[in-house]
Image: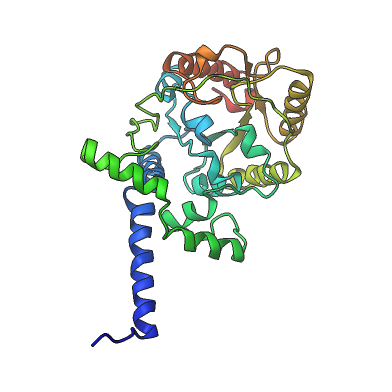
Amino acid sequence: MWKPLKLTSWFAIAIAAWLVGYLYNARYGGELSWLRMMYERKIALAAQVEAPKRLLITGGSGAHYTINAKLMEEKLGIPVLNLGLDGPIGLDVILPSILGQVRKGDIVLLIPEYLILWADDGFGDRSTQFGVAIGKPGLGGIPPKQFAQETFMLGTPTLRAATKSTVDLIEKGKFTGYYSDPVDEHGDPTVTKERTGEWWELPIDKAITPHAVARITEFKKEVEARGGTLVLSLPWVYAKTDNKSVSNVKKTAGELGKIAPLIYDKESLNMQTDSNLFADTHYHLKPEARAIRAAQLVEELKEINELQL
């Protein structure tokens, strides 16, 4: 005879279901899992490199997919590591997630996308879940209510993600994701994503928020407390060059330049007008463009006297 399940049994089933979802999302299969693994790989690479001076480059995917760290290392003569992550992690979580790797003598180059600089609270869609996935729940000061809600969702795979993974498993014999491709020994991506849609110029509708200014100012102090030096750079972006966009970039540059040395092309403001330089997004570059960008960064860094490069 059928008997209704006790409340404790339903509770146990709910926990088991959440754990299955968590394992998929954060450990293997879901997009967050690939991001976690990429982060852990980059942190491990940084931990292995011993040198009196290193260049650590960080930011969102607009850092990860836009430089050639190996080329920069050859030209600068010091180890260069690409610690770029993913914009939706949010500024307030990206910065503390790499801070532990900063050592005395290091140069930290922060290249934040404008989408990161526009957030009023420093958080993004993946802030809470990224912190939980890497074993640092609440990283960045996530508000308790937001933390609880988004941690709960970490155990619930979306239909779209589950469908994609099922198709991958059938067609490729394994799960894949945007960040599932390996990085090289410098933390650079080894695969270039291709754009399938039509191009359009990104409008820079806003300038940097007061919160972003305050958080990067705080980050400078944190880097210096560990014996490092912070340098900032405007990102390369395929952007509209209308008066509003140019004005917002100039305002952003003005605020960032008050915090730390800021490097960028003073004529173009790093606002690119050739879509052929870009891969799949307005920030991600093709390999040949990454080499050009790397060379620009090297020359600009050499002009900062206190870096002694």
Observer-nearest of 35 and 154: 154
Specify the farthest residue to the left: 173
Query: In this rendering, is residue 231 above or below 27?
Result: above
Query: In this rendering, is residue 1 above or below 216?
Result: below
* Residue 282 can be seen in this image: yes
In which quadrant of the rendered view does residue 234 lie?
top right
Whole-percent x, y for residue 13 in the image: 34, 73
Q: Residue at x 70, y 27 (%)?
A: 204
Query: In this rendering, is residue 162 above or below 271?
Result: below
Whole-percent x, y for residue 41 in the image: 35, 42
In which quadrant of the rendered view does residue 12 lie?
bottom left
Quadrant showing the C terminus: top right
Observer-nearest of 179 and 74: 179
Whole-percent x, y for residue 131 in the image: 48, 55
* Residue 30 can be seen in this image: no
Quadrant showing the N terminus: bottom left
Q: How is the image coloured?
A: rainbow
Q: Residue at x 75, y 18 (%)?
A: 242
Instruction: State how many labels appear.
Output: 0
Specify the farthest residue to the front: 1
Whole-percent x, y for residue 34 in the image: 37, 43
